[in-house]
Amino acid sequence: MNELLWGAMLLINFSAILFSYRVWGKTGLYIWVPLAVMIANIQVTKTIHLFGLTATLGNIVYATSFLVTDILSENYGKKDAKKAVGIGFFALIVMTVLMNLALYFMPDESDFAQSSLQTIFSIMPRIALGSLTAYGLSQLHDIWAYDMWKRRFAEDKYLWMRNNFSTMVSQLIDTVVFTLIAFSGVFPWPVLVQIMITTYLLKWVVALLDTPFLYLAKRWKSKGIIA
């Protein structure tokens, strides 16, 4: 069941990115980045069993942020991709501060949400620290690597190479840094290693599957369908 839901979530994420890009152009991509970062940092608090392994949720929506920065790098350049990373940083910091501030409000006797919010968002500062560190290092590497591969292999037939070579290394950096900061001491070491491995493998699959969507976004831009 989890595997079917994972596939459905993958399709929904890719479709949402393309819809946002088609309707709002470059602005639509900027809209997606903070959504992906915030949703992923909530979903990652849930541990699931997937393809016979222990994994955290949130891998898909977070991994799609790399597709967005790759589209921006390909169609508009490195500067616009870096702008999207900055927006993601800002969104995650603001969400973490505001939601943790909300926990300090004394709930009314009729309140039913405080304990649930406490469970999810009390760990958020640590997750946010891990996410911000990993997000910054991995996304800046991804933008640099994509630009480097694009300058060396500029032809459209190498688009798959630029996309996958840059993203797969970047996601390895992201996975190792985030898992160590966010979950060290939370899970036993064997579980931590399994989460690290499964998280990277799932992101690797997402990176492979997002390539056709990058080609489509490139086609829309080259044909003038999107400015």
Image: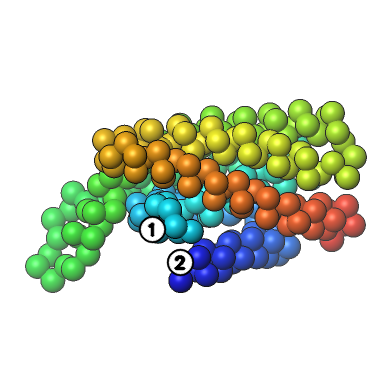
Say if residue 105 shows up in the picture: yes
Which residue was labeled with disc 2? Answer: 2
What mark, if any, has residue 48 been given in the picture?
1
Q: Are marks 2 and 1 in contact (CB under 8 Å)?
A: yes
**Closer to the camera, 133 or 200?**
200
Q: Is residue 93 above or below residue 10?
A: above
Which residue is located at x 65 percent, y 40 percent? Answer: 167
N-terminal of the two: label 2 or label 1? 2
The 10 Å Cα crowd at callout 1, few under 14, some 14 to 19, many 20 or more, is some
Residue at the (29%, 53%) spot, across then down: 120
Give the alpha-carbon distance from disc 2 to disc 1, as whole Å: 8 Å
What's the residue at 36%, 54% (across, down)?
47
Q: Taking the image as drawn, is residue 16 in sight?
A: no
Residue 210, position in %: x, y? Answer: 68, 54
The image quadrant that residue 24 belongs to is bottom right
Identify the image's colour scheme: rainbow, by chain, secondary structure or one colour: rainbow
Spot occupied by residue 97 in the image (x, y as percentages of width and height): 33, 43
Looking at the figure, which quarter contains the C terminus? Answer: bottom right
Residue in front for this viewpoint, 144 or 46:
46
Q: Amino acid at mark 1?
A: Ile
- Which label sits on residue 8? none
